[in-house]
Structure formats: C-alpha cells, structure tokens
Image: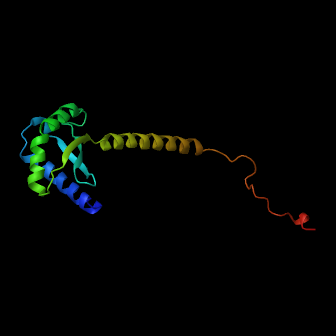
Amino acid sequence: MADAPRARKLAKRIAQIVASALEHEVKDPRLARVTITDAKVTADLHDATLYYTVLGDKLDAEPDTQGAAAALESAKGVLRSRVGAGTGVRFTPTLTFVADTVPEDAKHIDELLARAQAADAEVARLAGGAQPAGEPDPYRAPRPDDEE
C-alpha cells in the first residue's frame, strides 16, 4: 500500500502530464478548451480520476461538454501512455475523466448572493423611514418616586 502523500504527489504529477499533453500533443479540436482542474489517485495507485472543465468560446456560449467527454474518452490510451512515460511508476494508473461542476456551482452561488444583496437593499429601503414601536426608550429608568 502506498501512503497518502505519495498518492497526492502522483495525482499532481498526472494532472500536469495530462494537461500538457492536451495542450501540446493531442490534436483533437474538441479538446482545445478543456482544462484539468484536479486529480485524485486511489491509495493503491491503480486508478486516477481527473476532473476537467470545458471553457466556452464566448461568455454567452455553452461549452461542448459532450464532445469534450467523447474526445477525452478516445484519447485516454494516448494520455495513459504519456502518464506512464512521465511518472515512471511500475503500474500506470487507469484514467477516468469526470466533468467538474465547480464553475456551475460558483455561478449558482453568485446568483444567490446577488439575490440576497437585492433583498438586503429592499429591507434597508423599507427601514429607512421606520419609527420604533412603543416608547422611544424601551428601557425604563427608575423613577424618583419608585425609590421611596
């Protein structure tokens, strides 16, 4: 069994090798906008999971995630060969590609924060001219005649 620091180090190295191979060696145009975001290797160093995200061409355009997934699946053998040559481990880990949902989650959180900020602004606007209910000083000071 390998220790966890070795697995993390190997995962980082695999992510670098695959990202470099996608950028310089694999000539599939569907992989031009693919970015490797994270990698995890099992404790026995036999399986590697690579998380990727696909960037769109424009801000409004939806990225082609299905095309990128198919291209990564077809390039898996070449990428595994590059990983084997670049890491020098006895057993080259199998590669599994998983689409990373962090950009979508971040966009959703930004929308929720904008909605909360708008609600806070509305509450501040409504509270601007509000008068307190009851007396102006809700804490009653002892009266002189109460002390007797």
Q: Which residue appears at 12% of the width and 39% of the height?
A: 75
In the rendered image, the residue lying farthest to the right is 148
Q: Which residue appears at 11% of the width and 52% of the height?
A: 84
Depth check, front residue: 27 or 134: 27
Depth check, front residue: 61 or 91: 91
Q: From what the image shows, is residue 7 above or below residue 78? A: below
> Can the viewer see residue 87 in this picture?
yes
Q: Which residue appears at 8% of the width and 53% of the height?
A: 85
Please give left or right for residue 95 compared with residue 146 in the image.
Answer: left
Residue 128 at what x, y percent from top left?
Answer: 58, 45
Count every numbered label the image shows and give the total: 0
Q: From what the image shows, is residue 8 above or below residue 148? A: above
Depth check, front residue: 127 or 116: 116
Residue 58 at what x, y percent from top left?
Answer: 20, 36
Q: Which residue appears at 39% of the width and 43% of the height?
A: 109
Residue 144 at what x, y percent from top left?
Answer: 88, 66
Residue 14 at what x, y percent from top left?
Answer: 17, 53
Q: From what the image shows, is residue 134 above or below residue 108? A: below
Please give left or right for residue 63 compared with residue 136 in the image.
Answer: left
Quadrant location of the C terminus in the rendered image: bottom right
In the rendered image, the residue lying farthest to the front is 1
Kindly indicate the quadrant of the structure image that contains residue 44. Answer: bottom left
Quadrant location of the N terminus in the rendered image: bottom left
Query: Which color scheme does this rendered protein use?
Result: rainbow
> Can the viewer see residue 22 in this picture?
no
Depth check, front residue: 18 or 120: 18
Kindly indicate the quadrant of the structure image that contains residue 67. Answer: top left
